[in-house]
Amino acid sequence: MIDIKQYIIAILVANQFGVLTRVSGLFSRRGFNIDSLTVGETESPEFSRITVALRGDKASKEQIIKQLSKLHDVKEIKEMKPEETVVRELLLIKVKSDDSSRNKIIDAVSVFRSKIVDYTTDSVCIEITGESSKINAFIDLLKPFGIIEMCRTGVVVLQRGIDCLKN
């Protein structure tokens, strides 16, 4: 039986035009589905960090890491193990709000330690960060109020302690 798990891979790449296309193209050519993809410049403007969450078996994960390491612009790759990392995701969510629901929404915002970032007479826009399970629970709680729109970033991770992804 194949053991399918979610893996998170951090990739340090040269901060150059076309690198993301080459990295994501490798996933699609190999038939891997990406659950989450985040990209941003690092503390050094020469490099960007790509964080990819994917599902697969151990052999598939090892194959994708091997293929990524062959790309010229890839400087370092590291599997981010859950017990050794800080994992966060950002969600912006807009829900319907009226006089009868507003206090319940504000209570949910307080319990989940999130923040209202926009407030109108008929809607509330909320920002929340945390692990994916927290984000999912918050979405489920707000569904009955009527979700108008939402946007998730995907996961970002840093290794705990002094170790880091560096070139």
Image (tube, grey):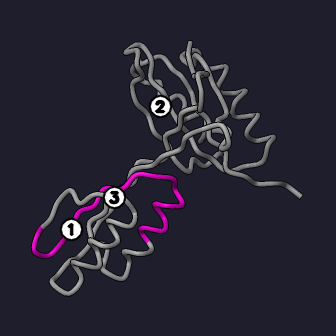
User: In the visual, does 118 lie left or right of 94?
Assistant: left
Whether the residues at callouts 3 and 1 have beta carbons within 8 Å, the answer is no
The residue pinned by badge 1 equals: 124
Going by the numbered disc 2, the residue's amino acid type is Thr
Q: Quadrant of residue 58?
A: top right
The label shown at residue 114 is 3
User: Which region shows up in magenta?
Assistant: 120-139
Q: Residue at x 15, y 84 (%)?
A: 99
**Magenta-span inclusion, residue 74:** no
Which numbered disc flags the more N-terminal residue, 1 or 2?
Answer: 2
Q: SS class of the residue under badge 1? A: strand
Q: Is residue 66 above or below residue 88?
A: above
Circle 1 packing at 10 Å, graded few (<14), some (14-19), many (20+), is many
**Magenta-span inclusion, residue 130:** yes
Q: Residue at x 58, y 16 (%)?
A: 75
Going by the numbered disc 1, the residue's amino acid type is Val
The residue pinned by badge 2 equals: 21
Which numbered disc flags the more N-terminal residue, 3 or 1?
Answer: 3
Q: Position of residue 53 (x, y in %)?
A: 58, 45
Determine the CA span between mark 1 and mark 2.
Answer: 36 Å
Going by the numbered disc 3, the residue's amino acid type is Ser
